[in-house]
Amino acid sequence: MKFGAHISTAKPFSDSVLRAKEIGCECMQIFANPPQRWNPSVIPVEEVARFRELNKEAQIRPTIIHSIYLINLASENPFYYEQSIKSLIDDMQKAYSIGAIGVNTHLGSTKGRELDEVLLKVVMAIKQILAATNEETLFIIENSAGAGHIIGDTIEEIGKIIQSVNSPRVKVLIDTAHAFESGYNLRDSDELNNFINKFDELIDIQKLIGFHLNDSKTALNSKHDRHADIGKGEIGLEMFKNIINHPELSHCFGILETPQDEISWSEQLESLRKMEEK
């Protein structure tokens, strides 16, 4: 498994490759737009070219873009719905331009409604985004921690959306903290196996392309999304070791989004590598 982290794209944008290389990333996640704003930023053409050139040498792959935080493909408000689609199209286009494999995103909130009530709206939005972007660029759904009626806190919900969209470009990324906080006790090896088997049954394990490897500051099934450094939260180290060495997950990559409260990313990356069974 390749390991990396969410790297800053503070100007100049292309220096994110150098920042990733400096801390020992083999893969990375970045923002291409300010995460709390609808207005997209412009990446200068020369910065796109420099990013690609630097990464040609550094080989930090895969690179994925994380969408902005405002996305809601289930919104009843036409403005937020259309802006969410436009923002994801913009991120997908930027992903293709810099050589990233795709865009990782949450899908939004049902605002108390049942998934079936908003399913068509979400599916049509994803299909519109796919139709407007390069066929090589992946649309990556991230699971949620279950707070605020956010879509995708269960395998069943994600599976229903993927089946309805029916595109090979739609993949999944599992955040370990979110899974734990939404009720999946992945620190138990039997429960981890059950999770993987259910994922394969309902979605297909090959559609799971990676993980956000985060410990959790909150308890199992808390529904509160709060990340902790690896081994410093409620999950503990054993789950990470089991995921890293699981034969069904050898095709996946792992990205840190931990707060670095106690341990730097370079140290956490080294810790993850030491867990690998050669």
Image: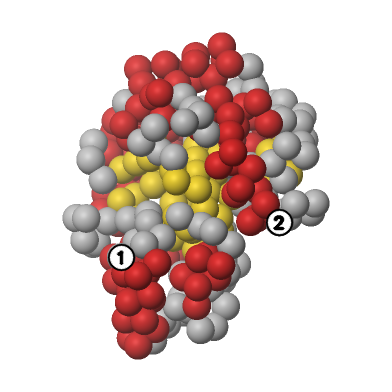
Q: Nearer the viewer, mark 1 or mark 2?
A: 2
Q: Mark 1 points at which residue?
A: 99
User: Sequence order check: which comes first, mark 1 or mark 2?
Assistant: 1
Name the quadrant containing residue 265. bottom right
Identify which residue, 145 or 52, lies in the foreground.
52
Residue 218 in the image, given as x and y percentages of width and height: 77, 35
Check residue 264 in the rendering and tell me which mark sits there, or answer none. Answer: 2
Does residue 277 show up?
yes
Q: In this view, does 217 lie above or below 60?
A: above
Q: Is residue 157 above or below residue 24?
A: above
Q: Is residue 242 above or below residue 53?
A: above
Instruction: State how far apart marks 1 and 2 are (Cα).
Output: 27 Å
Residue placed at 55% from the left, 55% from the top? Answer: 5
Residue placed at 39% from the left, 24% from the top? Answer: 248
Residue 219 in the image, given as x and y percentages of width and height: 77, 29
The amino acid type found where label 1 is placed reads Gly
The secondary element bearing badge 2 is classed as loop
Residue placed at 79% from the left, 54% from the top? Answer: 261
Name the quadrant containing residue 249. top left
Residue 2 in the image, given as x and y percentages of width and height: 45, 46
Check the image and name the residue furthest to the front.
278
Q: Is residue 264 left or right of residue 113?
A: right
- Which class describes the residues within 10 Å of circle 1: few (<14), some (14-19), or many (20+)? some
Check the image and name the residue furthest to the top.
190
